[in-house]
Each structure stands twice: as C-alpha cells, then as structure tokens.
Amino acid sequence: MKLKGGEKMPTQSSSVYAGSMLTDAINQNSVTPINLSGKVGYSVTLIYKQRHDQARIQIESVPAFLAALPNQNQFFAIELAHRFVGVTTPVIDGDRIMKEPLAMAVKTMPELSQALAAIQDSLDELTIPKEDLKPNDFDDPKKLVAECFDAVLYLLNLIAYVCRGFDLSMQDQLKQRMKKWFKDGVVKHRKE
C-alpha cells in the first residue's frame, strides 16, 4: 500500500529503524547505552547504531527494550507498533507542530469535528448492503476512514503527551481503562 507522495505504508516487518524514539526513551529513563546494552543483551556498538538508525531493532528485542526503559516509553512503543504492524498511527514528530499537551489538544479538537462530520456524511452508505454498493458509494466511507485516522493520530499523541506531561504511565492508564471495557462488555478479556 502506498501513501501520498509514493511512500510505502509499513506492513509487518521483523526489524525496523526507530532511532529517534529509542533515544527519547533512553533519555527519559536516564540510562546510558552501556547500562542499556547489559539489560537487553546487545553490544554498546549495536545500541549506538540503533539510536542513529544505522541498525534495525529486531521485533524479538522489543519486550527487553520496553522492560529496560519502563518510564515514559510511550513514544517508542507507539512508533514500534506503527512500524512493525502498520495499522496504528505514528508518533507526531514533524517540525510544524509543538510537541506538548496543549498543542496536541488544540490540534485534536478540529480533527475530531472533521471525523464526526465524515461519519455523519457516511451514514447512508454504511446502511447499503455490500452487494448493492455502486462506485460512487465509496467516496464518503473513504473520507470517513481518512478523517478518523487523522483524529486517531492526534488523539493517540495527545494521550502520550498528557501522560508525559503529568508523569503518568500510558500503559498503566490503558490497563485501567481496559478493565472498564471488559466490565462493560466492549472487549473480551485476553490472555496475557
């Protein structure tokens, strides 16, 4: 699948580059590459190369990295999920947006409004049986998907920045929310 501008959409991969987010997690945890190498079982040289996108991070090493960098690792985790699987949005790291909670909140509000409008515009197409769909019935649902992805991009990053700003563990907050979703029957309990 190709993105605008011809960039290839990541799918499933066994290794990825995520140097800037690894560096962020290392800095947030005040860990030296020497200490990290001992915790994940990699050489200091490999850690250095991974930090500078000269070597890929292997999918098998992700649990060790997250365990070795437990504090404020959400941006590293988001980026790895995006790059390894390709169905989650990436970390907002562009130069044209401030990376802090208020900026994310300001950007999220109009994205949510646009997503809600796209959902509203698609309601009639969503009620058409699949076998009766015509080519022009796909325009509004495609816009719905695009607008919802934009909203999810900002929402996910808003959550991550708020958790960082208030020193909350994003993963712990999600685990607490999962308990509510289980109780409400929205999602089924999954074995760890």
Image (cartoon, rainbow, N blue to C red):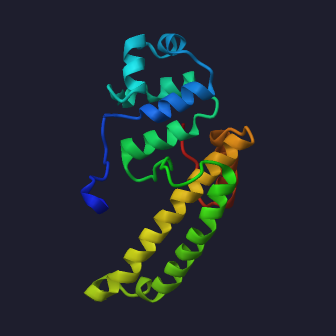
Q: Residue at x 33, y 29 (%)?
A: 56
Examine the rendering and report whether any part of residue 187 can be seen.
Answer: no
Question: Is 86 in front, or is 22?
Answer: 22
Residue 114: horizontal and vertical position, in percent? 54, 75
Q: Is residue 146 above or below residue 167?
A: below
Give me the residue at 50% from left, 25% from top: 65
Find residue 191 and report its image quarter.
top right
* Residue 111 pos. (x, y %): 56, 69
Q: Residue at 36% of width from left, 85% of height from top?
A: 129
**Residue 107 figure quarter:** bottom right
Lateral position of residue 179 relative to residue 12, left or right: right
The residue most toward the right is 166
Answer with left or right where residue 1 lies relative to residue 28.
left
Q: Is residue 123 above or below residue 63?
A: below
Residue 157 location, x and y as percent?
57, 51
Q: Residue at x 55, y 30 (%)?
A: 25
- The count of marks equals 0
Say whether residue 134 is left or right of residue 62. left
- Residue 69 visible at all: yes
Quadrant for the N terminus, please: bottom left
Residue 182 location, x and y as percent?
A: 64, 53
Q: Residue furthest front?
A: 96
Q: Quadrant of residue 103?
A: bottom right
